[in-house]
Image: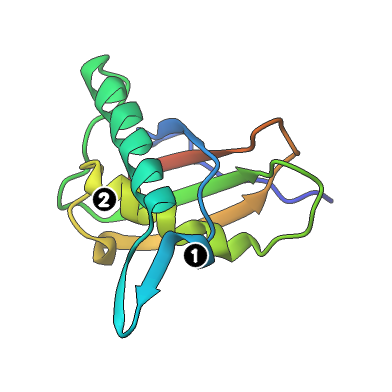
């Protein structure tokens, strides 16, 4: 049986289609003891902010602000090459927070992640909704 992402029908779930995220290994860079977000990480964050802003402006999405949050993610890889599914989460969660979908990562009570079908360029499909 193939696993699926479960989104309850009785909640107001928000659907976002995001670009393929940088892995945690490419999201961070180091210069001596100093760690910072890479150019690839900053570009991804800017793209997510643009997508979220457009979704909010078109009334398809609203910020969950300080509410408890449930996040489900389907990662559609760029190729059939092996990759660590969990390495994609950090960039997505940080970018959604910076885009204003929620105030802080500590609000997330549940994260589900699933490997989807390979698509050209890859993508991340995200479902967010208010938790209990």
Residue at the (15%, 52%) spot, across then down: 66
Residue at the (43%, 49%) spot, across then down: 40
Q: In this view, does 2 lie to the left or right of 92?
A: right
Residue 95 picture location, percent across and down: 33, 48
Work out how far the residue at label 1 is from the one at label 2, CA to CA, in angstroms. 16 Å
Q: Which residue was labeled with disc 2? A: 97
Q: Is residue 32 left or right of residue 89?
A: left
- Image quadrant holding the C terminus, namely bottom left
Residue at the (26%, 67%) spot, across then down: 106
- Nearest the viewer among 78 and 68 is 78
Q: In this view, does 89 lie to the left or right of 3?
A: left
Secondary structure of residue under mark 1: helix
- Mark 1 and mark 2 lie on one chain; the one further toward the N terminus is 1
Badge 2 local density, few (<14 within 10 Å), some, or many (20+)? Answer: some
Residue 7 picture location, percent across and down: 51, 41
Residue 111 appears anywhere in the view: no
Residue 87 appears anywhere in the view: yes
Q: Are marks 1 and 2 in contact (CB under 8 Å)?
A: no
- Label 1 or label 2, whichever lies nearer to me, is 1
- From this view, report whether residue 21 is shown above or below residue 48: below
Q: Quadrant of residue 43?
A: top left
- Nearest the viewer among 73 and 35 is 35
Secondary structure of residue under mark 2: helix
Residue at the (35%, 28%) spot, across then down: 51
Badge 1 local density, few (<14 within 10 Å), some, or many (20+)? Answer: some
Residue 30 picture location, percent across and down: 38, 74
- Nearest the viewer among 71 and 132 is 71
Q: Which residue was labeled with disc 1? A: 24
């Amino acid at each position: 049986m193939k696993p699926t992402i479960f989104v309850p029908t009785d909640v107001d779930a928000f659907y976002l289609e995001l670009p393929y995220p940088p892995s945690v290994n490419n999201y961070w860079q180091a210069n001596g003891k100093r760690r910072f977000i890479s150019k690839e990480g900053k570009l991804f964050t800017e793209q997510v902010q643009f997508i979220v802003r457009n979704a909010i402006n078109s009334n398809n999405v609203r910020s969950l602000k300080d509410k408890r949050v449930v996040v489900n993610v389907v990662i559609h890889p760029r190729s059939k090459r092996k990759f660590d599914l969990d390495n994609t989460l950090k960039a997505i969660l940080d970018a959604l927070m910076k885009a204003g979908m929620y105030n802080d990562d500590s609000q997330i009570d549940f994260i589900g992640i699933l490997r989807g079908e390979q698509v050209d360029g890859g993508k991340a499909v995200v479902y967010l909704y208010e938790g209990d």
